[in-house]
Every structure is written in structure tokens, then in C-alpha cells.
Image (cartoon, grey):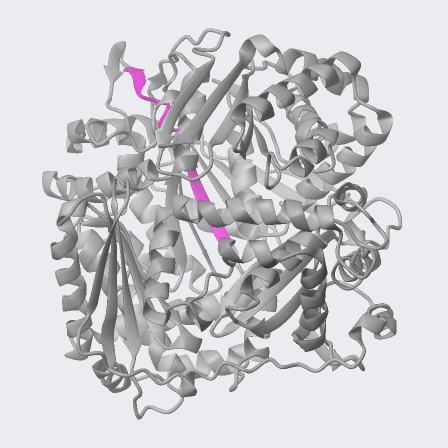
Amino acid sequence: MQQIDFKLNNEIKVHLIKNDKYKTDLLALFLTVPLQRENITKNALIPIVLKRGCNKLKTQNEINEKLEEMYGAVFDAGLDKTGDNLIIKFYLESINDNFLPGDNQNIEKAIELITNIVFEPLIENGSFIKEFVDSEKNNLKVIIESKKDNKDRYALDRCINSIYGDNGYGLSKLGYIEDFESIDEKNLYQEYLKLIKNSKIDFFISGNFDEEKISIKVKSLENNSLLNNREEIFKKNDFREEKKEKTDEIKEIKEKMDVTQGKLVIGLDILPNNLGDYRFIAAMYNTILGDGANSKLFQNVREKAGLAYTAKSNYIIQKNNIFIRCGIEIDNYNKAVDIIKEQLEDIKNGNFSDDDIENGKKYIVSGIKSIYEEQDTEIIFSYGQEISPIPVTPEEYKDRIKKVTKEQIVEFAQNICINTIYFITDKNI
Amino acid sequence: MQIIENNLIKEKVYIEKLENGMTLMCIPKKGISKKYIIIGVNYGSNDNKFEVDGQKIEIPEGVAHYLEHKMFEQENGRNSLDVLSSLGVNANAFTTNDLTAYLFGCTDNFYEAMDELFDYVQSPYFTDENVEKERGIIRQEIQMYKDEPQTEVYMNALRAMYKNIALRDDIAGTVESIEKIDKDTLYKCYNNFYTPENMTVVVSGDFVPEEIFKEIKSRIKTDKKVMTAKKIKEKEPEEINQEKIETKMDISTPIFIIGYKDKVPDKEIVKRHISVEILLEIMVGNSSELYKELYEGGLIHYELGTNYEFSADYAFCMIQGQTCDVETVTKRVKEKIDEIIKNGISEEEFDRIKKKIYGFYVRDFDSVETVANTFLIDHLKGINAFDYFEEFLSLTKEYVEKVGREVFDSENMILSVVNPK
């Protein structure tokens, strides 16, 4: 693997990740902007409106036929929250020419297509096409309403929202139905222009290609006048500035829904500590607590008590949170919460073995080694460092993990506290 | 050792059948640091009735899956999943209607992990206590699926299509059926089905086939053939069970599946599979007229999902989606299908969709996990993943149209809907 990064004269950052391990070439175009209540719904609408047609291929049908002609290339757009930023993601995956009959120039076509869709939208009288905007508002409304259909994911979103409220990380990335009325093809296009002007733009190209040819191809973006005079207002998420305060009382929220199984989410705060760049200690803490089959949650909530099928935790670096998630029998709520609290106390008191630490290290290191085995993971890791205030290479990451000690984990654990317990139940308990 | 090569995608598969009946397969991937191994047992949730020494045995729903959970338990008190995780490998297991599989993938410690994998799959240790302990966990797994609208609409589609075979039942069983499972049930199924001839081992990664096969053989406990129980196949009529199943859940917008029950094909199954995939794309895929009509009309909000599944006991295809107007959407889908079956497909779309599907097949060869899983599943169906590339080249528009007339018969169509409460 060989990575070459360079900037175009319009500040778009290109990352060429070259290797011959895959049969596909993957392009990823990420637009990063701060999460803000006033434009979140518009930002959620923009990618799905862009998918409807561009200047060269004016309908979704033409785009889809073009993708099919390219031996089933796949285009997709999505949204992600990373700390206080929203990332609007566009992906295009196509088959590498080496595995196709004839000379196709598939990757060149792919670069042209994805940049056309994102940077050369279909415009009429200085606005988006009314029909596209109206129908995508209707689609997004249905998707927003469907959020509660996945109860497990819904519980996590509700827990996050109860911690952060309706701003920054607490916002719903899909936006809000009440905003729809004020959005039209004109003001949505204006928002698009702002997005193009102010977002941080990263263009990842992963696969087996001739870097000179590809660089020239990408540089043609410098001729797009929409991309002139760009000024990025993006701010890196710094975990060191995300200072949590100890809350006196644990928030306990129970929401009644029609469920067979109770969905339990516990949001933990990582309070300020004296451990410096503690991201690696936090990752080890989280692994020992709830990541993988050797973790305390898996062993105690699932294997010993038989209370759950899933019992796990996730570490959210940018926001200094850890979220615990379990699906449990509704009547076992108190029992499960007690066992989970015991696990948190156990780590605080150093009740875990050297084996637990070794297992945790192997688990994380093996995950880091796998980064190079998947195109998408490789891109996501690289992008993660791009927006991190203290970037690390996978090698550094592994070394830092290997150096974490038990004392550090125990010290780190002293500054972990429960912020919110969120439970979806079908009855009052 | 048999070697099959595909020049188009530049891959080879090495196959060896051992004297004890076990099949080994290796798809080498040079320069890839990830290694993956999967042991597949030709025994799944559908195999609830079988015959041993002339005696018929019927077991509760969910045994194959329960067995999968309990295989990790070892006599020395260790749990193999913990041991494998301690080695830093990514271990797992799964049960489908047709098979049970045990697997792991890793970048380091492959051979140590392989010791553990072969050890636990070949040495069951069930006690009243450890079987009892698992019941709560499996109960929660079943409850989790009950809250998933997608599972509900899918299972009801199968129930509408099938009258008798166990495809109707949840793979994990029910909260009630798993109460009837004890250690004797598990041993009975293990001893009768976890036999060498019922097992296939597939590896993919940077391996020399001869060497990895030698490593595998040194970990196999018996070189003799062992009797495998005879599965009793339920008779399944060609007709559907019922036209429509509708239920309610706490969701926002209705979801639906339109299904076509296909007769179990006895030949040219790969060609049939590709043909149905091409037809489904032309009928409802995202470049189809119908997709355009429904999407632009605000009736669907993203593309319709499609699939064709088959084994020696069943074959069916499904079209699924979410809509606020199930009646209009399903009516239009049916009309469009009938129209295409009647009028045929155009050369232009046939060629374009063929290219699309070719690309999807190539993609499957990118990850060691997908490639090994695909070879395993296809092997149990008596086919080989490369067959798809071979058959692809010779497939004609006329053949695809003929398959279309057989599969998309409105007599064999069912509808499953989950509505909001």
C-alpha cells in the first residue's frame, strides 16, 4: 500500500491509496461541515437531491444506466456524525479493468461520474429542480419517521439526544420534518453553494491505477468555477476540549413502546483526567468493559447471568463517551443495570487480570492490522486521522495500545461516570 | 487434488476429498495478510426429522442453532470462543436453514486458533447445567428478532409459500420449542450429523494449498467414515400455502414482500439463478421503468430489494420494499412482471444488466470471508462458485425469457405485509 496526499488549488484534498489487492476501485468524496440545527435538514436533503440527476446525466435513470454499463458500479450517498461535525459521504465502487473483458477505463469513468454528480448539479434558473426537491422531501420524511422502526438503534439515538439536547452531536443527522415547510428548490441550492464553499472536502481514490493519469484526471476539478474561492469553516474535534462535568444524579429515562425485548442503553461520561493523550487507555478500557467475547459485559451479563444475547460497549473518541447497549427481558431491568454497574466498579477497583489486558491488546491490534484488508476501512481510518487534532499512523496506534498499563486503566476508570440510563420497555417498571 | 481455474477473474480453487468423506477447499490469495477458515456442517434448522437404524426421530425447532451455541463449551471448563478471542482472532458461528458453520478470520495466530477450532468442533461437551445456562441467552436472541419488522415480513412470506417444510420455522426456534431441548437432544444431533462426510472445510488467504491441507488433516480426529443419519424430507406441494399474510407492528410505514414459489429445479440451477437475477433487475431494478414510476410517484422511497434462494428442498424469489400504498405498489409490480413475461426483454437491457451482474460476481472475490463462504454454500448445493462465470457467457435472452415464464407464474405468487398498528 502506498498513499499519496496532495491539495488541489481549490483546497480539495486528494488521497491516492494505491494497491493491487482488490478487484474493485473505490472512490469516496467526503464533505465535512459543523453540525448545526439551522441547516441540518437541508444538508440531509442535498445528497439525495444530487442523486436525482446532474448536468451531464439529467435523470436518476440515466445515472443508473451509466452505472450498469460500467459493469455494475455502485454509487451511494450517506450521512454520518463525527463528534460535532456532519460528514456527507459519496461513494462510487467500480470493478478494476484488470478483471474485465476489453479496455474499459472504468476508474476514469468513475471519477468523472462522481465529480459530476457532486459538483455539477442540474440547475434551472439558479435553483435545483423543484420536482426533485419536492419528491426527496417526501422520501426523507418517510425515512425520518421510520427511525423508530429499528428499536435498538432508536434507543441509542434517544440516549445521545438526552445527553446533548438538540444541538451538535445530539442532533438527528437526518434532520427534522418541521423544517420542510421552509425549504424550497431555491434556498436548498443556496445552501448547497454554501456547503461546497465552506466544507472540508476530501477525495479518496483507492485501487490499482496509474497515479499520474489519475492525478491529471482529478486536477480537472480545478476548472470548476463552483469550487473557486473556497473557505473551509470546519473545526477539528478535539477530545481534550470536550470537558465533561460530573453530574450529581444519574438521569434515568424509560420510554414505553411496543417491544418484545427491552432495549437498554447506558451513556457514560469520560471526565477530565491527568492522563494526557488518553485515547489509547480509553480504547483499552472500552475493550475490557464491552468489546468482544472476553469483555466483562459479554462474560457477566450474557455468559454468567444469561440475561442478554447482545451486551457490548462503544467508545466515541470525539465526545468522551462510552455507550453500553443490551437487549434484555423487560423484567430483568434492575438485575441487568446492577450487573453492569458492578462491572464498572470492578474495573475501578482493578478487578481484572493481566490476561484481560493482554486479550484486549491483541483484540485491538488485530483490528488495526485488518485496516489494510478492506478498502473502505482503510479510507475511514485515513479520514479519521485527517480530522483528528493528533493524527496517528496504524503503526503508532498499535505501539500506543501495547504500552497501556493496568495502573493507567484503573486510574482512567476513576473518572468514568454514568450520565444517562435509557430503557425502552412495554410497561411501567 | 482437483484444481479449477478461472482466467477472467484470475482465481483458482483447490479441492481435495479425504477418505473419511470430508471435503477440503482452498482459494489462495497471494499477498493478503488476512486468513480465514470456515467449517461447514451439512445440517441446518430445516433438518428436524431424520432416520437412524430405521427409527424415525423428530426433534424440536431450533436444535441446530442451540447446538451451534453449545459447541464452544469444553470439558476443561473453557469456552472456545473466549480462547479464540484471547488469540486476537475474530471467531464466530452461524446456523442457516441448510447448514451450521464455525469460522474465524485473523492476521496472526492462525495455526494456534486452528487447533482450537478443530478441537471444539470435534469434541462436544454438553451437561444439564451448561445447556440450561444457554436457554436465557437464546431466548433473548429470539426476542430480539421478534422486534425486527424485516424478520416478521420475511418469515411470513416463507409461511405463505410453504405448507410443510421447516423453512416455515424460525432458525432459532421459539421460546416454547427451545424449552424441550436438553443435552441428549444435542448429543443425538451431533453424533448423527457432525460426521466427516457431512463436513466441508474452506480456507482463503495467503496459503500454499498442499501445506494448508496437510495442516488441516493433522487436526482431524478420525480418518474413518462414520454413518450419517438420513434426513427425512417433508413432502412439499408445488402450490403456495396461502396468498397473503398481513400482520401489525409498531412501525411507521408498511413493509411488504412479494414472493414467487419456484419448483425445485433438478438441472441447470446456476443458469436459472442468473436468469432470475437478470429478470428481477429488468422488472424492478433501479434502472427499470417501474422503479422510475414508483419512485417519482412518491410510492417508494428507495430501491426495492430482490433475491432468489434455493437448495435441494426449496427455491423462491422475493421482491421487498416499504410503501404507504401497498395495494397500488403490489398491483403495479404484478402487472409489470406479467407484461415483461408476455412481451419479453430487449437486447439492450439484457446486455446492460448482464454487465451489472457480472460486476457483482467479481466483487464477491475481493474478501477472503465472502469468497470462502460462497464456495462453502455453493458446494453444499452441489455447485461451484466459478460455474456462475462459465454459465454467464453462454446465457441467451431466450433462455432467460423461458425461465421467466416458469418462475413468475401468478398462481405461485404470495404477499406478506407488515402494517403499522
Which residue is painted at 35% across and 22% down in the image? B47
In percent of width and height, residue B278 lies at: 71, 29
Q: Nearer the viewer, residue A33 or A109?
A: A33
Residue extending farthest front: A182
Which residue is painted at 73% across and 28% down in the image? B391
In percent of width and height, residue A319 lies at: 40, 76
In percent of width and height, residue A252 lies at: 20, 63
Residue B209 shows up from this direction: yes
Q: Nearer the viewer, residue B129 or A339?
A: A339
Left or right of residue A156: residue A254:
left
Question: Quick check: A174 above or below B310?
Answer: below
Question: Quick check: B170 above or below B214?
Answer: above
Q: Which quadrant of the figure contains the N terminus of chain B?
A: top right
Residue A114 counted in the magenta span? no
Q: Nearer the viewer, residue A135 or A228?
A: A135
Left or right of residue B4: residue B320:
left
Which residue is painted at 29% across and 64% down in the image? A290
Question: Quick check: B236 above or below A350?
Answer: above
Residue A73 shows up from this direction: no
Say how many tags the image has: 0
Which residue is painted at 66% across and 56% down in the image? A184
Task: Give, as a single range, the part of the protein colored magenta.
Answer: B36-51
Q: Which quadrant of the figure contains the C terminus of chain B?
A: top left
Question: Quick check: B31 above or below B45?
Answer: below
In percent of width and height, residue A78 lies at: 59, 57
Residue B44 counted in the magenta span? yes
